[in-house]
Image (cartoon, rainbow, N blue to C red):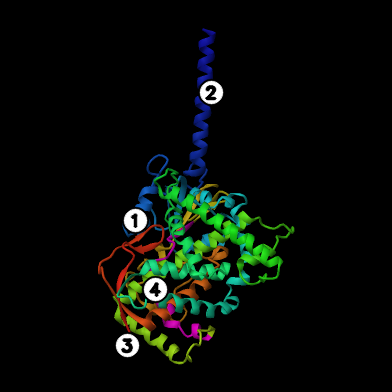
Amino acid sequence: MDFISAIFFTLTTLLVSLSLHFLFYMTKYTGGSGGAAPLPPGKTGWPVIGESLEFLSTGWKGHPEKFVFDRMAKYSSKVFRTHLLGEKAAVFCGANGNKFLFSNENKLVQSWWPVSVNKVFPSSTQTSSKEEAIRMRKMLPNFLKPEALRRYIGTMDRIAQRHFTEQWENKKEIIVFDLAKSYTFWLACRVFLSVEDPKHVARFADPFNALASGLIGIPVDLPWTPFNRAIKASKYIRKELVLIIKRRKIELAEGEALPSQDILSHMLVTGDEDGKFMDEMEIADKILGLLVGGHDTASSTCTLIVKYLAELPEIYDGVYNEQMEIAKRKTPGELLNWDDIQKMKYSWNVACEVLRLSPPLQGAFREALADFVYNGFSIPKGWKIYWSASSTHRNPEIFPEPEKLDPSRFEGTGPAPYTFVPFGGGPRMCPGKEYARLEILVFMHHLVKRFRCEKIIPDEKIVVNPMPIPAKGLPVRLYPHKA
């Protein structure tokens, strides 16, 4: 009888303990007698995978904003709960959500990347994302600020001329996305690595495409998955980059390369505050990340600019007239310069509208560094937070007729703060924003100066995987301007 009583007492104690733990959790995170804030409304979906498949599939189907807008309508237009890429998550919506996250970077939240990214970029797990952000942003400003990039405009112009001459001219039809990738990758290799030989650049092309396709997604490492192909591509590219790094070390030692000639040289000669230098593999990872960011996002935007210029003759005419005014003032062989870029105001307004309608990245993740309350809801420490560009970019209260491409939205002071966020914001704003502006405008200059384009597939769908691109790569017919 005493044995049975002991078992009963033990079970009773366990049940009471579990009940108290449950009540504490409910009080802390779902609103109890203490008045603590509840968790955001929403649902977590299926076990393990959560709502990841729906989150990704809306992009594959061409409507990435649907996942966010459906839940904004059902749960809350400010913040809702979900489960993405293996993590409990809250999605912050609207300009106030953007402002909160961007203003609290490295205070309440820090940058977070899915498991797939950490496996493709192994050294990203060696330091915290906060340390990594600080470290990289100390290195990059010397090269990516407007005043520093001015010296590269002539280089960009020269490469653009070669690109259009070799890959566009004397062709009746082309696939725009393929050629846009070639252009932006060539530029990135030249500016970041001083690699300009087209044959050398071409060796990276297929591996980079494989890497980009599997970078953001469900991290299933099986031979037939995009994630597996991305890991293999990453290993191949990093090996090639290490060879370039080794050669550059020798060139620097022998005075055949300058410490200031590109980002690679700067990384090799610049130590941290303790005098410690990055090893070759770590530099390879950083350069790999810059190449992905420097060419994939811009190639998507350049492709979609061609799409809209082909669809909207009045927009094309505006860009054409502006660019031809610049071209007419150039002497034969004279390259574009900073003053020319500053005159491309209408062209950049058009590009910004394309970035609003189809931002290269639909949003980004943060991680909560502590428990905090946002808009009356509790966000537990460790939760992942996703901000969505579409929650403002396609909001009719912010941008009337949001589906319409209207460059005038960017005249004067432009959109209200925190509503136009294709490059993020706060300390984590994309450091390559100005670089992207230059390569896009140089591309537009050479495109309209040479051709008018016609879409071959009038109703071609835009898919997001992970960047927005036309499903067939945007095949177009080229109509050269008469001399």
Residue 62 percent location from the top left of the image: 32, 60
The span picked out in magenta is 339-364
Q: Earlier in the sequence, mark 2 or mark 4?
A: 2
- Nearer mark to the viewer, of 4 and 3: 4
Q: For this view, does 31 lie left or right of residue 427?
A: left
Q: Amino acid at mark 3?
A: Lys
Tell me the tag on residue 60: 1
Crowding at dot 4, Cα within 10 Å, few <14 / some 14-19 / many 20+, comes out as: few
Q: Which mark is residue 139?
A: none
Badge 3 vs badge 2, beta-carbon distance below 8 Å? no
- 355 falls in the magenta region: yes
SS for dot 4: helix
Q: Earlier in the sequence, mark 1 or mark 2?
A: 2
* Secondary structure type for disc 2: helix
In the picture of the structure, the residue carrying the numbered disc 2 is: 13
Look at label 2 and name its amino acid: Thr
Task: Specify the farthest residue to the top.
Answer: 1
- 177, 416: nearer the viewer: 177
Tell me, yes or no, whether the two marked residues, 1 and 3, touch with CB atoms within 8 Å: no
Task: Indicate whether 367 appears above or below 155.
Answer: above
Q: Which mark is residue 482?
A: 3
Instruction: Give the main secondary structure of the magenta stretch.
Output: helix
In front of the other: label 1 or label 2?
Answer: 1
Residue depicted at x 67% and y 63%? 249
